[in-house]
Image: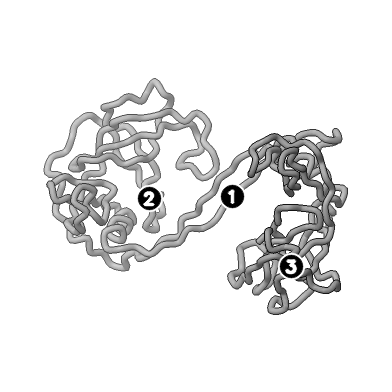
Amino acid sequence: MTATPAPGATLSAPLVVEFPFTRSLGPVQSAFLTGLRERTLLGVRTDAGTVLVPPVEYDPETAGELRDLVEVAPTGTVTTWAWNPAPTRGQPLATPFAWVLVRLDGADSALLHALDAPGPDAVRTGMRVRVRWAGRRSGAITDIACFEPCPDDAPEGWPRPHSGRFDNPVTGITAPARLDYTYAPGRAQSAYLHALAERRTVGERCPSCRKVYVPSRGACPTCGVATAEQVEVGPRGTVTTFCIVNIKARNLAIEVPYVYAHIALDGADLALHGRIGGIPYDQVRMGLRVEPVWSDDGRYPDHYRPTGEPDADYDTYKELL
C-alpha cells in the first residue's frame, strides 16, 4: 500500500483476494459437468417429480438422496434478468450483457447464466433463448459460453431419461475464486501505515482502559470508545503463540516449513502477527524476544528475527495470548 505525498493523508489501494477452490465430484455433479462437455444438459428428478437444473445431490424438501437423472433441452425461457453494463474480469462476456435466470425446457427450476443481447431493450421476461456452446469444452459451467435469443417455439418431449454415464467422466474441478476491491483503511490505520513507511510502529491508547492497540482501528474493542492518542511501540517484542506452516502458498517465495507468530510489541496491549525468520522453525518458542527485519522497500517488516535477549517471563505476556 503506497502512501500519498501529503503527510497524514488517508490511504486507499486496490486489493485482490484470490485462491483456487478444489473439490471432488459425486455421481450427480460429475454427470452434469461431463454432460456439459458433451453438449448435454442434465437435471435431476426430485421425490415430488420436479426437475432441477442444475441438479443437486439431495432433495431440498425431503433431504433424500437423488440419482434419477434426466436430459433437458438446450432452449428455455427467461424468468428474470438484470443488465450488466460494465463486465469485469472473468465474467462470461467482455461486452455488456444480461444476467438471466433461464428455465430450460423440461426443467422446473432456473439456471443462472449470461445472455448475449445488443442492449437492455432487447431483453424481457418470458423471452425464448438457447444455449451457445463454447468452442472448447472441458467439463465446467463455462462450457455454456452464454445464452442467445431464439424463436418462440418450444420443443416437446422433454425431459428425457438419461443414465448419466459418459466416457472419461469429470471427477473433480478447480474453480478460481477472486475478489477485487478498493480498501480505504481510515484515519487510524492510515496513521499506522504512514508510520511503518518511517520504520516506526504506532498504536492508539484507549482514554478509558488505557490499553494501547496495534494496529488501531480507531476505537477500543473493549470499551467501544474512540481512540486518538498515538503511542509508539516496539520495535522489539515477544512471541506469545505461534504455528508452523507446512503448506507452501502460491506466489509466495518462502520455503516451508516456516513460522507465523503472534508478537506482543513492547508497550502494546494487543499482539499482532508476523513471520519469524533467522532461526530454525523448531527453535521458535513462546517468550522468544524478536525484532523487525524490514522489507527491501522499507514499508513494512518482512519478518521478525531473534534479538539474542533472554526469553521473556511468561507472566509478562500471559494476558496477550
In the rendered image, residue 61, in percent from the top left (x then y), is placed at: 20, 47
In the rendered image, residue 288, in percent from the top left (x then y), is placed at: 76, 70
Residue contact at pointers 2 and 3, CB within 8 angstroms = no
In the rendered image, residue 56, in percent from the top left (x then y), is placed at: 27, 52
Dot 1 or dot 2: first in sequence order is 1
Q: Which residue is drawn at 12% across and 44% down?
A: 157
Q: Is residue 43 left or right of residue 297?
A: left
Residue beneath label 3, please? 276
User: Quick check: 209 above or below 68?
Assistant: above
Q: Quadrant location of residue 296?
A: bottom right
* In the foreground, 235 or 183: 235
User: Quick check: 260 above or below 226?
Assistant: below
For the residue carrying disc 1, how many other residues have a C-alpha within 10 Å: few (<14), some (14-19), or many (20+)? few
Tell me the CA gap for discs 2 and 3.
42 Å
Q: Is residue 198 left or right of residue 126?
A: right
Q: Is residue 84 left or right of residue 263?
A: left
Under mark 1, the amino acid is: Val
Q: Residue at x 35, y 42 (%)?
A: 132
User: Quick check: 172 above or below 92?
Assistant: below
Q: In this view, does 31 lie to the left or right of 209?
A: left
In the rendered image, residue 205, in percent from the top left (x then y), is placed at: 77, 43
* Quadrant of the drawing holding the C terminus: bottom right
Dot 1 or dot 3: first in sequence order is 1
Q: Is mark 1 on a helix, strand or loop?
A: strand
Residue beneath label 2, please? 141
Tell me the CA gap for discs 1 and 2.
22 Å
Q: Which mark is residue 17?
A: 1
Q: Which residue is drawn at 26% across and 59% down?
A: 28
The answer to whether one can see residue 7 in this image is: yes
Under mark 3, the amino acid is: Ile
